[in-house]
Image (spheres, rainbow, N blue to C red):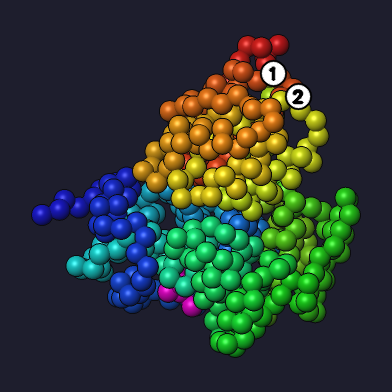
Amino acid sequence: MMQTPRTLADWLAHCERLHPKNIDMTLDRVRAVAQRLGVRFEVPVITVAGTNGKGSTCAMLESIALAAGYRVGLYAKPHLVHFEERCRVNGRMADEATLLPHFEAVEAARGDTTLSYFEFTMLAILRVFMHTPLDLVILEVGLGGRLDAVNIVDTDCAVLTSIDLDHTDWLGPTREDIGREKAHIMRPGKPAIVSDPMPPQSVIDHAGRIGADLWLAGRDFRHSGDRQQWQWAGRQRRFNALAYPALRGANQLLNAAGALAAFEALYEQLPISAQAVRQGLALVDLPGRFQIVPGQPTLVLDVAHNPQSVAALALNLDQMGFFPRTHAVFGAMRDKDLPALLAKLAPLVDHWYLCDLETPRAATAAELAAAVQALHCANPPAVETHASPAAALRAAVAAADPADRIVVFGSFYTVGGVLKDGLPRLSAKHAG
């Protein structure tokens, strides 16, 4: 007889034991339990899918809606340090006491139905939102779309961010395959915002097939700007002289443009003012997305973990100015396209600090070192391996000069691993 879990950590351990697979591509089980729980929302729901830019888009949607005075629930994944980051209510992550009754309710409703970790925890968070007075629910899709557990919820507005090659074992080998999977978050007659400026044809075809109200970047909404400010125009609304979002990076205007299109599409239910847009974009915060930590040496944290996102990271780093040396702390999953991913950043890196991660899916530091050394650089960089991201970062800080730059990137486990115990103090040579 199982003893009822009493803490959030106990519940999460229970969720990990429940189902033999981390990823089980069917919605039948989670949909059946959701029906028993009566999962449904009376307020608008925005669902966000894509390869890169999902987290940033969700953060902008949340920040703008909060600035407009709306009550917002955001389901985001994965988390960097604390599980509670996945459940945000009115801009704050939920506490353990808030979550526990909803884990208990899911356990009672599931009976003998097995649920994966992602399915169980998502249902608990959806139930938090159902029992909280909200005006808007934002749901971030994880892997794919068609068979992601979030897709049991009928969205009022689907947003597709950039689409590129990732999780190809599950989603298919081409952008067309991946786009087809992600497009299944769209619903007939409901707005479907596509912020990728060059979406796969499969996305457009699926929207037409089901009769979604398709909003395409460059056709139904567009943005432009200079170094000081930018502007956005939709089907009927426009915003001029906007300051750049607080999130750094070359791709953030694409994400912001998609978020503004979603708000125009839902304007009758959720009117948003220009002031809310300005305030929301100025205050938006999302750790681990080209996050620059103050101090010396310059420290950049980024969860880029596929060729497209690492290419964007490389562009952003290139635009930062001159640094004598760049030190890179890197850890990643074994199923990533490591040669393509590493090749994007290798020209900028002088010293690699490769690390093991606390998950069986991860490539070992030794495997990563072999991948770096196989790049055949004209001037081979220094390469060392470490048992954890925190140890790798400590080594990088010890080796770096004040004028250097340290980049921590790769998996959420990599960035989360350096944040978990607090960032290291600068060594004596940096303090002087």
Q: Residue at x 64, y 27 (%)?
A: 380
Q: Is residue 151 magenta?
A: yes
Q: Residue at x 66, y 44 (%)?
A: 344
Residue 242 against residue 334 in the figure, above or below? below
Quarter holding the C terminus is top right
Q: Is residue 218 magenta?
A: no
Q: CA distance from mark 2 to mark 1?
A: 9 Å
What secondary structure do most residues of the magenta stretch adopt? helix
Query: Neighbour class for label 2 at 10 Å: few (<14), some, many (≥20)?
Result: few
State yes or no: discs 2 and 1 in contact (Cβ < 8 Å).
Answer: yes
Tell me the SS state at disc 2. loop
Query: Which residue reaches farthest left?
Result: 1
Residue 241, numbered label:
none
Q: Residue at x 65, y 83 (%)?
A: 213
Closer to the camera: disc 2 or disc 1?
Answer: 2
Q: Tell me the amino acid under the disc marked 1.
A: Asp
Q: Decide which of 194, 80 is in the foreground and name it.
A: 194
Tag 1 or tag 2, which sits nearer the N-term?
2
Q: Tell me the amino acid under the disc marked 2.
A: Pro
Image-quadrant location for residue 352: top right
Residue 324, numbered label:
2
Residue 401, numbered label:
1
Image-quadrant location for residue 99: bottom left
Residue 132 against residue 216 in the figure, above or below? above
Whether residue 298 sits left or right of residue 25 in the image: it is: right
Whether residue 6 sits left or right of residue 78 in the image: it is: left
Q: Residue at x 62, y 18 (%)?
A: 399
Q: Which residues are magenta?
A: 150-154
Residue 105 locus on image (x, y percent): 29, 64
Tell me the SS state at disc 1. loop
Residue 210 locus on image (x, y percent): 56, 87
